Amino acid sequence: MSEYESWKPSRVRQLIREGKITEPTTGMCSGYAQGNLVVLPKELAYDFLLFCQRNPKSCPLLEVSDAGSRTFPVFGAGSDIAKDLPRYRVYEHGKMTGEYTDVSAFFEQSGQELVSFLIGCSFSFETDLLQAGIPVRQIEEGVNVPMYKTNIPCAAAGVFSGNMVVSMRPIPHHLVPAAVSITAGMPRVHGAPVQIGCPEAIGIVDLMHPDFGDRVTIHEGEVPVFWPCGVTPQNVVMNSKPPFVITHAPGHMFITDARNAELKL
Amino acid sequence: MSEYESWKPSRVRQLIREGKITEPTTGMCSGYAQGNLVVLPKELAYDFLLFCQRNPKSCPLLEVSDAGSRTFPVFGAGSDIAKDLPRYRVYEHGKMTGEYTDVSAFFEQSGQELVSFLIGCSFSFETDLLQAGIPVRQIEEGVNVPMYKTNIPCAAAGVFSGNMVVSMRPIPHHLVPAAVSITAGMPRVHGAPVQIGCPEAIGIVDLMHPDFGDRVTIHEGEVPVFWPCGVTPQNVVMNSKPPFVITHAPGHMFITDARNAELKL
């Protein structure tokens, strides 16, 4: 586990801000929720906010910054969005143009105000699955969760449209009801699965070749269970090729002040 | 009960559209959710959408129309927002300037595109309370639910800010846990209460003089329980005195195609 496992989020964010932590945030600040970041110019913010409202399962918004602000006052008191993640990606017209450990220059030099969106992540419900004795395969195998493009259309909003991306966890068949029940109780981090046991029904042809992340082993007696995935909003944003977007780099998340348990409220 | 109690929502909306139903929608289309309506010019829509995102308990958004559109495709297939409510109110700069049974002229003549917001209503959870044997006093007494201004600040967004408005239902003390549990399971229609038994803690000084609606009897052994109320967004919008707003007239709601039970998902 991370040496920062038992640290407070504000302290770890401070070390990240000072450039003293640059690695992925996995395992840091155990029990606290981590979130996905999407930063867009103000002119695209309404369409994206509406997209999230219409697709709450794949795009569960935790917090939206004020336009031009660099902080999440609720989920990260005193945070600096432009410095408190260990690694960022910048995309222009749908193409990645660079990775950065500090994007404050983009906030300062951008021709217009930026709006930052913090989106819930299924890592938050995996703690509860594990505590209930439900295996989480990609953690066991030390790889990234397998993710797949589906044929499930998201509700479009303005310039944003596209299909849902899902993550998959193989669950022993007798534990599937518990896995559904536990995750259904956490709608702010994607909630209940969208599909259980029939990948072809949502357009997935080969579980061993995920579109994102890594393949994992599916044991005899296990059922593939599919949850809406936070890659959906990033994917949809990229599809629309906006002039300018900042996101977190994979695994380099925003560590929030909210405990995972608080996301059940 | 209403003679339209067992009718389908689309049929009742059609009769309203034709001017054949003009009364309040209470009791119509039993089992189907009814929603509050707020219609704003596009230039205010981002701030209001953000306000709802930041205050989901008092402003649970069910659906947001496309700008310039007059329909809610998900919650009211084939609906005409400008004609399918029996009565509307128009406000200009914070003052009511008229009541109408058809606001299509405003949609057509407005200098800019309008955006319509459909907001969940606690009527949806009252059915479940009654079915669980929990009394709903204002229904027993045939009056409007008592509503109170509180000292609980909403999270501000752009031009919109203000305090939460709550509705109150007196609940027998041994049924309070059940009332909390049932309503907590329906976050899309305000969810769990914000206060139980201590009105003074949220700035309410006299239960017998509600700020909106009617007073109801509180029997011996009953506890006043307070839920976030859909009057909050209307109140907040009016506080900001926007140039132009359309809302439903009290009790004259949008009848949706969604069954109340679907709002638990």
Image: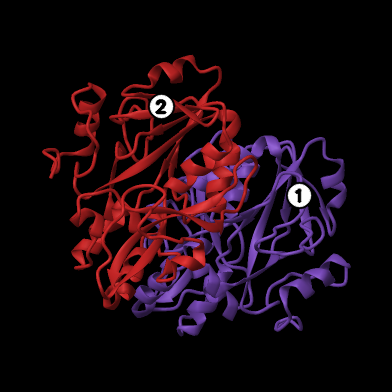
Chain colours: A purple, B red
Residue B149 x %, y %: 47, 53
Residue found 46% across the figure and 81% down from its top: A134
Amino acid bearing label 2: Arg
Looking at the image, is B152 positioned above or below residue B22? below
Q: Is residue B1 above or below residue A62?
A: above
A210 or A54, which is in the foreground?
A54
As drawn, is A58 to the left or to the right of B261? right
- Tell me the SS state at disc 1: loop
How far apart marks 1 and 2 lie (CA) works out to: 34 Å
- Residue B153 is situated, as x and y percent measured from the top left of the image, at 58, 56
> Tags 1 and 2 in contact by the CB under 8 Å rule?
no
Would you say B243 lies left or right of B77 here?
A: right
Numbered tag placed on residue A69 in the rendering: 1
Q: Nearer the viewer, residue B45 or B135?
A: B135
Q: Looking at the image, which residue is at 60% across and 46% down?
A: B161
Say few, some or many: other residues with alpha carbon within 10 Å of mark 1 (under 14 / 14 to 19 / 20 or more). Answer: some
Q: Pointer 2 indicates a residue of which chain?
A: B
Q: Quadrant of residue A161?
A: top right
| Residue drawn at (40%, 64%) of the image | B192
Task: Give coordinates of residue B59: x percent, y percent.
Answer: 47, 49
